[in-house]
Amino acid sequence: MLRLLAFTVLTAAATFTAFAEGSAPAAPAAAPVAAEPAANPASPAKPAETTDTASAPTPAAPAPAAPVKLTFTRCNVDGPYIAITFDDGPHPTQTPRLLAMLRERKIHATFFLVGQCVAENPEIAKQIVQEGHEVGNHSWSHPNLLKLSADSVRDQLERTHNVITQEAGVVPLIMRPPYGNFSQQQRAWAHATWNYPTIIWDVDSLDWKHRNPAKTESIIMANTRPGSIILCHDIHKTTVDAMPSVLDKLIAKGFKFVTVSELIKMHHEPIAPLVPAKVAKAPTLTAKKAATAATSLKDLDTPKPKAKPKTKTKP
Ligand code: NI
């Protein structure tokens, strides 16, 4: 028994070290995905090759080429979609209060659960999921993960992953490190191990700090925009006190609430900035130069194109 346990621990540690030291995030992420389908088609591989020679290389090529996005602080979406998130629960009294407010408004939120709180309040964790909200991994006891050993980080996330799966009845798809503290290597490892993207936030209500409903509301209302991920904590009474007004005002501004995973599915990389820069330079400027040169030669009174007509008059 002891030998078996020791072997398991050593294997787990070795696996973690391998992922933690890997510099390229794409490689470990692709490995577990490729491992699953490879186990099945031992014999069916031959007929597939003969019939689908054209389609076979197509799905294989984009998979490794697509970059893995490990972190989301906000999303780029086409529409007024936002995700509101509540951390550090479930709380025995505040979380049920909040759930009633969300239910009344048909809003789905995302709860980043602390493992030991799930163990203490399993029925509330179950209720969160049953009412259509998303749950994510927020570690077991809310430590600064940057300061822990690799084994301790694994323990923090693994225990929480398992207690959420067992008690809430759903496998968490996302994680948020306490205080947002998680290195790039840890993010790559968490993605390779549980397929977790690391979820941060772009709107920090600072509710834990000021404990003031009016400030919670003003910060959220001033900073929320389409694609925002809003950070709140459902363990504070003052935060939940702020919610009826915050939620109603966000709805009144036209925002639509989705879970973090739903928001991520809508995300696309920003490509707009590159396009106008290239288009604007060459054709527009030469056309303007020609136009101003023509008018200044005729009128001889425009002060601005002084430098330009000099060059234009030569040819
Ligand atoms: Ni937290």
Image (cartoon, rainbow, N blue to C red):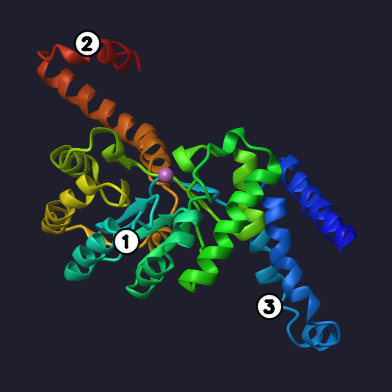
Q: Residues within 10 Å of mark 1 (few under 14, many from 20)?
A: many
Tag on residue 258? none
Query: Which quadrant of the view contains residue 298?
Result: top left
**Disc ID at residue 55:** 3
Foreground tag (3 vs 2): 3
Tell me the distance, in whole angstroms, between the alpha carbons under discs 2 and 1.
61 Å
Q: Is mark 1 on a helix, strand or loop?
A: loop
**For the residue marked with disc 1, what is the amino acid?**
Ala
The N terminus lies in which quarter of the figure? Answer: bottom right
Q: Do the residues labelled 3 and 2 touch (CB within 8 Å)?
A: no
Q: Residue 306 carries which label?
A: 2
Q: Which residue is drawn at 68% across and 38% down?
A: 149
**Circle nearer the N terminus (3, 2):** 3
Q: How crowded is mark 3: few (under 14 residues within 10 Å), some or many (20 or more)?
A: few
Q: Earlier in the sequence, mark 2 or mark 1?
A: 1
Per the model, the C-alpha gap separating discs 3 and 2 is 62 Å
Q: Which residue lies furthest to the right in this view?
A: 3
